[in-house]
Amino acid sequence: MKYNSALFESLFLEPRKNGLTRPKSVRGVGTYMVNMGELFQHRRLQAIEMDRVPLVDREASFVLFKGDLLFARQSLVFDGAGRCSIFLGHIEPVTFESHVIRCRLNQVTASPLFYFYFFESPQGKSSITSIVEQGAGQAGICGSDLSKLRVPHPPLSIQTGIASLLDALDQKIELLNSQSSAAENLTRTIFESWFVDFDPVRAKAEGREPEGMDTATAALFPDHLSSSSSGILPFGWHIERIGDVALINRNTVGRDYPHRRIIYIDISSVRQGRIEFQDEIERSNAPSRAKRVVTDGDIIWSCVRPNLRSYAYIAHPAENTVVSTGFAVLSATKVPSAYLYLHVTTDKFVEFLSSRADGAAYPAVRPEIFQSAGIVVPPKAILSAFSDLVSPVLLQIGLNERRARTLAQIRNTLLPRLISGKLCIPDAEKTVGELL
C-alpha cells in the first residue's frame, strides 16, 4: 500500500521552535532542560537525569508537551545532525536548549510516535540527510528545511497502529534494560560492601553479625583489619597485579581460525556494561581490527577514551564471537570472572585508566596498563561464595541483553516495511505478539 504524503510543517500544531540559551553559570536550579547530551543519549526522553535552569514566566512557551519531537540542529559528526528524539512526558516541567528544534504535531491528524519512528527509518534518515549541511568542524540542519520535508501521511488509524506495534517492542526492550541495570547495581552494591568498604569485617570487629549474608558466609570473613604496605586490608587478604590473576588478550584470530563467518563487536556498540549491537559478517569482509577472540566470562574494555566506560561482561557468547583490537580482553585465571569484572569497572579503576591514557585528542591506554593495576585478593573461599552469589545475576543480565538485541533487530526490520506500507499491520501484529 502506498501512503499519501504531506509537507512536514502542514502537520504542526504550532510553528517549530528553537530552544533557550542558558550558560553554565546559571545552571543547577529551576526547570529541567533537555540538552544535546540527553538528545543523543536517549531516543525516548522521559525519566532521565537533566540539568536545571532558571525559567521566567514569559518563557512558558518553551516548556515541552508529551509527544513533542526534538531534532538536533548541530553535531560534530554528519550522522548526528537532525537526530530525532521524542519527549514522552515528565512529572515536572521540562524545557530545551537552543541547539534543539522542537516540532509539535497536531495529534488530530498526526501521531508523534509514528513520525518519531519514521525519522528512525531508512526513508526518514535519508530525508534528514538531504538537508544536512557540512560546516567547519560540524554538521547541521536548518529548521526551515526540516519543515519543508515531505513525509508519509497515512490515515491516523494506520499511524497509531504502526506506532503501537513498534512502541510495544521498545517498551519491552526498555524493561529488559531496566531489569539489567537494577541487577548490575545490586551486584555492585554487594561488591563494594564486601571488598571496598569491608563491611562484614568491620561488623565482626565491632561484635555485630554481618548484614545480608548467612552464618556460613559470615564465618569466612576475618574479624579485624590490618595494616600493610598496600594500606588497610582485612587480615589475610593481599594485593596482586591483575596480570597475576588474569590474562590479557589471550586469544587472537589466526590462520587456523575455523569459522568462515564471525559475530563482530566493535567499540561503538558497547556502552557501560551493555553490548547494544553485534554484527554477523563474513570473515573475509571483516575489518582488519576484528581479531580478538572472546569466551564465556571474558571482560572487554575499550583502550580508547576509558572515561567513556565502554566495557562489557561476555556471557555465553557464540563460539565465533570476535571483538575489535581496540578492546583489551581480560580472562580471569586465579579469581572468579564476576569478581574481576566488578573490580575493573569501579569508579576508582576508571580513574586509574583515565589518568594513564596517552594522547590529547585520542587518549588511549595500552594493554600493559591493565596488567600493572592492583587488585585485592581475598581467600578463595570468600571469592567462591561471592561468585556463587553474583555469577547467576551476571548471566541473567547477559541473557536480557541478548533478548533486547534480538527485539531491537526485529523492530528495525519491521520499521521500514511498516512505514513504507509493504507490510500490513495484522501480519506485523502476529509477529510481535509471538515475541512478547
Image (tube, rainbow, N blue to C red):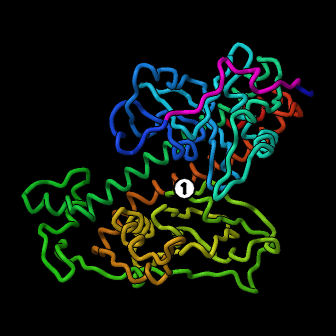
The residue positioned 65% from the left and 39% from the top of the image is 84
Q: Crowdedness of circle 1 by 10 Å Cα count: few (<14), some, many (20+)?
A: many
Tell me where residue 413 sits by quadrant: top right
The residue positioned 60% from the left and 28% from the top of the image is 17
Q: Quadrant of the C terminus?
A: top right
Tell me where residue 207 sits by quadrant: bottom left
Q: Picture coordinates of residue 349 (x, y %)?
A: 37, 68
In this view of the protein, can residue 426 be seen by the observer?
A: no
**Residue 129 located left or right of residue 224:** right
Q: Is residue 7 magenta?
A: yes
Q: Quadrant of the N terminus?
A: top right
Q: Picture coordinates of residue 419 (x, y %)?
A: 81, 33
380 is higher (above) or lower (below) than 6: below
**Residue 339 located left or right of residue 159:** left
Q: Picture coordinates of residue 396 (x, y %)?
A: 51, 52
253 is higher (above) or lower (below) than 306: below
Q: According to the image, label 1 marks what residue?
A: 274
Q: Is residue 21 magenta?
A: no
Q: Picture coordinates of residue 202 (x, y %)?
A: 14, 61
- Hey, which residue is sitting farthest left in the picture? 207
- Name the residue type under label 1: Arg
- Hey, which residue is sitting farthest front in the picture? 136
The residue positioned 72% from the left and 28% from the top of the image is 114
**Residue 145 located left or right of residue 245:** right
Secondary structure under badge 1? strand
**Residue 387 located left or right of residue 16:** left
In this view of the protein, can residue 159 be seen by the observer?
A: yes
122 is higher (above) or lower (below) than 276: above
- Region in magenta: 4-20
The residue positioned 10% from the left and 54% from the top of the image is 208
Q: How many marks?
A: 1
Tell me where residue 282 sits by quadrant: bottom right
